[in-house]
Image (spheres, rainbow, N blue to C red):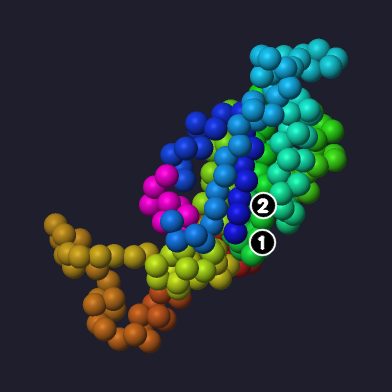
Amino acid sequence: MRIDIITCLPKLLESPFGDSILKRAQNKNLVEIKVHDLRSFAKNKQKQVDDYAYGGGAGMVLMIEPIANCIEHLKSERSYDEIIYMSPDGDLLNQSLANDLSLRKNIMILCGHYKGVDERVREHYITREISIGDYVLSGGELAAAVLADAIIRLIPGVLSDETSALTDSFQDGLVAPPVYTRPAEFKGMTVPDVLLSGHEKKIEEWRFEQAVNRTKKRRPGAIGG
Ligand code: ADE
């Protein structure tokens, strides 16, 4: 999979992909992540990418020209399954959307900033708009990093134990059951006996029951009460 991210603040996206699972996924050639600086697609000497909103009002708007130049340049090199705009009013990201997107080959993600992007970009270039929650961030970069992380960890081979994405919260519609590790007792706090029993079937039943109870309590809508 290839993910191209367009931003006017490329520095913000240096560290999320430089470590741990996401770094390993790139080293194993399971994903290629390219960050593009919108300013290098600006036409004028000042490398301007934003301007005042027509009609007045506070806040700057990202201009269509550098964005169109960047998107068209990328599209001339390969075809894209989705051109995503990160926006607080987009479709809410959930596990099923992440699963869907993890099956695509090439994805482009545009990060908004300031008051957003010229509406013509959304109308003519964007195929999908995604929000990571009903709150407003300073820009789309952190949201793009969240989206990319949620997608990349689902690509087969990215997680060393391939089953571990399958046991994630929400992967089967339930939140994950509690987990414990050594020591079996710490300052009087113990681990449920069943997990120490070595009885695989009982452990599986216990985990399922815990997941159902947790889901009922924390995400009641998910399993109808
Ligand atoms: N840009 C600003 N806030 C955002 C959000 N909540 N989700 C996606 N992109 C954003």
Read off the magenta span. 18-26
Q: Residue at x 37, y 64 (%)?
A: 178
Q: Return the residue nearer the eye: 28 or 88.
A: 28
Residue 114 falls in image quadrant: top right
Q: Which residue is mark 1?
A: 104
Q: Residue at x 43, y 39 (%)?
A: 15
The residue under label 1 is which amino acid type?
Arg
Q: Which mark is residue 57?
A: none
Query: Circle 2 is placed at which residue position?
Result: 107
**Callout 2–callout 1 Cβ contact below 8 Å:** yes
- Residue 44: tell me if it is visible: yes
For the C terminus, give its image quadrant.
Answer: bottom right
In the image, taking residue 171 as reference, residue 199 lies left or right, namely left
Q: Secondary structure at mark 2?
A: strand
Q: CA distance from mark 2 to mark 1?
A: 7 Å
Task: From the viewer's perspective, tell me whether residue 154 is left or right of residue 121.
Answer: left
What x and y, as percent, mark residue 184? 18, 68
